[in-house]
């Protein structure tokens, strides 16, 4: 997927609302991860990528506002377009908050990478590499073969053009910038073909950074959950899940107070580091606020636009459904082993009841509907579990049931 950055001068380019909103969703969710990683690892290059994506989303929101206005010709269409504006505004607010988090990486806080790796673990490491002349013309597949490891390439940026999740056949050019994710050992091995050697972590820890790192991890988790559930609420048109998003947003207000107190109690942190930690906490809470704003039209009785269903189901990070059949009746979510395959279960719908963020020991019953989240690469696996046509039909039935309840 390609996306071009823009200059300060706005230039109108007609594009379908669906394409614009899908790109905004993809970019804003990616920015959440990149911003927290940049802060956790003190990675200024990663922060710079966040700033570039923020500019792109600003441009997209303006473009969407113009395009959606042109498409609104009736009161009914106007009411449904509100949900489009809400998601676009939320995506833009998320991108602004992510940029604020990344900005602290550049200006105030320099968390040692060794400390972050020790506390955060080595299973989900992100790094940025610039393609040297020696690799010009090579594909990602060739690099994977040469290094003997495979990493997830989140972004390939070529000048002002951004490619999200490029395929293995993506051909590299000198000067391209890659943002990759994988285990620390795999990323370290992959870095060698770029002439970079990421050193092994040291055992000497600077404990003064623990409250900031713990805060980053807590907010990273809760902010992503809020955004995920907001999309679930809009997809299913569920008032119950929308209210759950609001509850989580209220929880982040309390979390903000708690981490702020903890950061300012840490005497070893400099004033600059304390202010930086506080600023990150405020920006993190803003992501949850954006998620809550996304569901406001739904709670006010405004029906979401039909386009949103397709956008959520076709994005880089997708949300869909699986219905439990007889053979899986009585199994726990752990026994289904979906999480081991990369499929996250956000909620379970059992008749008129919703179970949000169920535990691994939750037992499913025949007829239960699992609301799942997965990456686009896992579409073939999800298709095996539940055919696309059946998933579309299930979602339509849920939407009708939930909207009738309103």
Image (tube, rainbow, N blue to C red):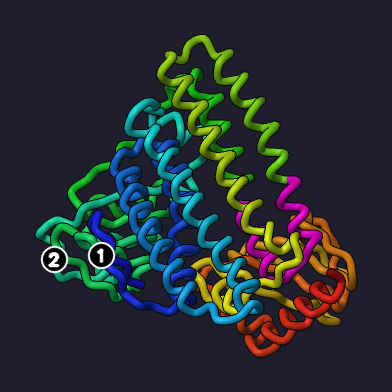
Q: Which residue is mark 2?
A: 136
Crowdedness near tag 2: few (<14), some (14–19) or many (≥20) residues, C-alpha within 10 Å: some
Q: Which residue is mark 1?
A: 161
Q: Please state if 297 lies on the left or on the right of 97 as rendered.
A: right
Instruction: Name the residue rendered at 52%, 9% in the picture.
Output: 267
Q: Is residue 227 magenta?
A: yes
Q: Please state if 47 lies on the left or on the right of 331 as rendered.
A: left
3D distance between C-alphas at marks 2 and 1 = 17 Å
Magenta-colored segment: predominant secondary structure: helix
Q: Quadrant of residue 182?
A: bottom left
Q: Position of residue 201 (x, y in %)?
A: 38, 33
Residue range highlighted in magenta:
224-247
Q: Nearer the viewer, residue 137 or 28?
A: 28
Q: Position of residue 177 (x, y in %)?
A: 24, 56
Q: Quadrant of residue 229?
A: bottom right
Instruction: Name the residue rendered at 77%, 66% in the picture.
Output: 238
């Amino acid at each position: 997927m390609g996306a071009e950055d823009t200059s300060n001068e706005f230039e109108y380019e007609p594009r379908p609302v669906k394409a614009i909103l899908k790109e905004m969703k993809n970019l804003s969710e990616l920015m959440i991860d990149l911003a927290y990683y940049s802060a956790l690892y003190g990675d200024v290059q990663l922060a710079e990528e966040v700033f570039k994506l923020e500019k792109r989303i600003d441009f997209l929101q303006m473009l969407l506002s113009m395009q959606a206005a042109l498409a609104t010709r009736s009161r009914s269409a106007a009411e449904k377009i509100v949900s489009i504006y809400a998601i676009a505004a939320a995506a833009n607010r998320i991108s602004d908050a992510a940029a604020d988090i990344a900005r602290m990486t550049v200006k105030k806080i320099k968390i040692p990478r060794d400390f972050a790796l020790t506390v955060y673990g080595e299973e989900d490491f992100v790094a940025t590499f610039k393609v040297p002349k020696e690799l010009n013309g090579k594909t990602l597949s060739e690099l994977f073969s040469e290094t003997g490891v495979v990493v997830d390439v989140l972004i390939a940026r070529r000048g002002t053009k951004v490619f999200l999740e490029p395929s293995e056949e993506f051909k590299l050019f000198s000067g391209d910038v890659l943002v990759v994710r994988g285990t620390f050992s795999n990323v370290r091995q992959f870095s060698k073909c770029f002439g970079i050697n990421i050193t092994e972590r040291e055992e000497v820890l600077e404990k003064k950074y623990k409250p900031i790192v713990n805060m980053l991890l807590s907010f990273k988790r809760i902010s992503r959950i809020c955004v995920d559930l907001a999309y679930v609420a809009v997809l299913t048109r569920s008032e119950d899940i929308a209210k759950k998003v609001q509850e989580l947003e209220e929880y982040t207000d309390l979390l903000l107070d708690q981490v702020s107190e903890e950061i300012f109690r840490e005497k070893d942190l400099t004033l600059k580091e304390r202010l930086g930690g506080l600023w990150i906490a405020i920006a993190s809470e803003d992501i949850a606020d954006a998620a809550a704003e996304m569901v406001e039209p739904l709670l006010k009785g405004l029906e979401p636009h039909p386009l949103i269903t397709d956008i959520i189901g076709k994005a880089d990070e997708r949300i869909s459904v699986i219905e439990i059949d007889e053979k899986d009746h009585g199994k726990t979510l752990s026994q289904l082993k979906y999480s081991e395959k990369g499929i996250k279960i956000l909620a379970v719908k059992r008749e008129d009841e919703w179970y949000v963020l169920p535990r691994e020991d939750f037992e499913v019953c025949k007829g239960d509907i699992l609301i799942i989240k997965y990456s686009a690469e896992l579409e073939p696996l999800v298709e095996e579990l539940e055919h696309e046509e059946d998933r579309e039909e299930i979602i339509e039935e849920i939407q009708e049931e939930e909207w009738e309840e309103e």
